[in-house]
Amino acid sequence: MAHDSRDQPSLFTTAEPAASDDTPLAERMRPRSLDEYIGQGHLVGHQRLLREMIDGRRVHSLILWGPPGSGKTSLARLVARGSDARFVSFSAVLSGVKELRVVVEAARAERRQGRRTILFVDEIHRFNKAQQDAFLPHVEDGTITLIGATTENPSFEIIAPLLSRASVLVLEPLAASDVRAIVERAIGDAERGLGTRGLVAEDAGLDTLVELAHGDARAALNILESAADLAAHRATAILTTALVEEAAQHRALRYDKAGDEHYNVTSAFIKSLRGSDPDAALYWMLRMLEAGDDALFVARRMVIFAAEDVGMADPQALAVAVAAKQAVEFVGLPEGRIPLAEAAVYLATAPKSNAAYKAMLAAADDVRSHGALPVPLHLRNAPTALMRQLGYGRGYEYAHDRPQGRVGHTHLPEALIGRTYYSGITPNGDAQGEERPPSDNDEDR
């Protein structure tokens, strides 16, 4: 049952937890107002949706979709606080329909007293279809306002009737500057944070901590708390790179996603694929992923490579690369590394031809240099008598009526007759790849 502060902990809670010495730092540092909330400016910035909703006390059901540590639970609590609603936290891992009935009965009693109930369901995607169906009548009649949090794509994990009754808000991984601001606030906050411990943070130590957090505020604060505990037993309480790595039990890869090393590693990955070296391709790909590169960035590079460097030698390579992109988008990391690895091995071991890519470059050059050349009359559509009188469509040969589908007229503008762009052959024959100038896929610049 829902409980007050005198009750023992249960499967769901109806109030924000009181901070104590043994409360995790990440929980103690939850923002108490939108002014304290860091990140997700597209939702909580000036005149943005959630800020307007809270300021206007017009709260309706929401699905918050975002990666771990992006602020979903904190936002749900702020929505409840801003609307003076009773907040009930409900775990999809520990609770079910039986517990929901208890929540609903309590919500009805609160509603009779003029107070709404916001039911926050963490990891709502873990509920099956029947369990999700149980929310519907109570959301429809206003007994509860549902806020669900999920790290999975709601289109696949949340039933359509529930989605139609809620707004889906997408939270992004926190920017490095946001994570750093959250960490610095926790270091200096003497009331809820570590301000009384005298912890001094080196810039390099902060950079390492932010890098290891990968946009996850909870992970950043957990690492910080462990580092502070370690520092308490050292001669000086300094947050160094070594201390952060020891606290995280993970060594940060020296890799700046916006710097030269990013382009170097990306280039090594592409050149390993082009050089038909699956072992090196896998190594460089995992370097990128371990350093925090977006898995979809890696997938996009392989989609480009499949069309540009494998090309007509194996057109199926493009389908494999696109399927890997869709798979990692669907399952996320770390499991998404598996289809990415499969695609990388396929592309590295596939035959190579850049003939179609070179043909595209040559055709694009003619488009730029010759401008808008007129379409030959025999290729023009002739839907009216006037157009036919003007010669539109005259002399056009329908390829299906010709032997082997070959026609006697040209399809290029008159100024380009005889021009050849594609010198390769069909996918059923031998592809003829040649050297070509580097493309954007070499360095991703």
Image (cartoon, rainbow, N blue to C red):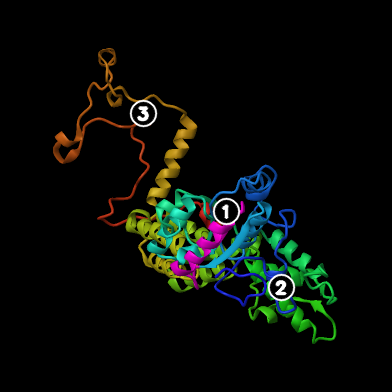
Q: What residue type is labelled 1?
A: Arg
- Please tell me whether mark 2 or mark 1 is closer to you in this view: 1
Which disc, if any, is residue 413?
A: 3
Rendered position, 73 above or below 34: below
Frontmost of labels 3 and 2 is: 2
Q: Is 110 contained in the magenta span?
A: yes
- Give the CA separation, mark 3 to mark 1: 77 Å
Q: In the drawing, does residue 203 fall left or right of residue 250?
A: right
- Eye-nearest disc, 3 or 1: 1
Provide the residue span drawn in magenta.
Answer: 92-120
Q: Please rate how many residues cluster around mark 3, counting C-alpha atoms within 10 Å: few if below 14, some from 14 to 19, many from 20.
A: some
Separation (CA) of disc 3 from disc 2 = 70 Å
Q: Name the residue under label 1.
A: 112
Please, is residue 29 above or below residue 430 in the view?
Answer: below
Front-lying residue, 236 or 409: 236
Image x and y of residue 55, in percent: 68, 46
Q: Which residue corresponds to mark 2?
A: 25
Determine the residue positioned at 74% across, 53% down.
35
What residue do we see at 65% from left, 78% from top?
251
Mark 3 vs mark 2: which is more N-terminal?
Answer: 2
4 shown above or below 417? below
> Dot 1, crowdedness within 10 Å: few (<14), some or many (≥20)?
few
Q: Which of marks 2 and 1 is nearer the N terminus?
A: 2
Task: Name the residue: 47% across, 64% down.
Answer: 101
